[in-house]
Amino acid sequence: MERTKVAKHTVNSKIKGKEYKVQVHTETCYQQIKQLTLEDWLNITELNIKKANNIIFSDTIIPSFKRIRKINQENIYENQLVKYIEKDEQVAILSGFPFFIVDYLNEEKYLEYYGD
């Protein structure tokens, strides 16, 4: 799957564990965590924050630091429920680790990596 399409990518919300793992394995750009570079982690983080921004604000750009601070589990869940799960039985998969990275970064570092 192209990295640019990931921000809008969803999977069937009724998919079972093994099926999900097979699907993810065939679609991911990243297979070995020990081989990921800083650039890979920055890209993974960018893709996840863009996806969360799309889920909540219907916008696939990199959100500002101020906007990303408004993204939380509750509003991700509420928006997923209305926009994807109830509507199409789809769910967007997000990794929690990129949000940890964003929390760890101060605003200056965030802007250095992801711009304004």
Image: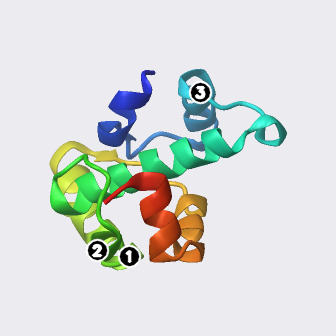
Looking at the rendered structure, the secondary structure element under dot 2 is helix
Residue 93, visible in the rendered structure = no
Where is residue 45 drawn, in percent x and y? 52, 52
Residue type, numbered disc 2: Asn
Q: On the image, numbered disc 1 is attached to which residue?
A: 72
Sooner in the amino-acid sequence: mark 1 or mark 3: 3
On-image quarter of the N terminus: top left
Q: Is residue 19 above or below residue 58?
A: above
User: Which residue is denoted by mark 3 in the rendering?
Assistant: 29
Distance Cα–Cα, label 2 vs label 1: 6 Å
The residue at 62%/40% (across/down) is 39
Image point (30%, 78%), residue name = 70
- Asked whether 36 or 15 is in front, the reply is 36
Residue type pointed to by label 3: Cys
Q: Residue 8, position in %: x, y?
A: 29, 39
3 or 2: mark nearer the eye: 3
Q: Which residue is mark 2?
A: 75
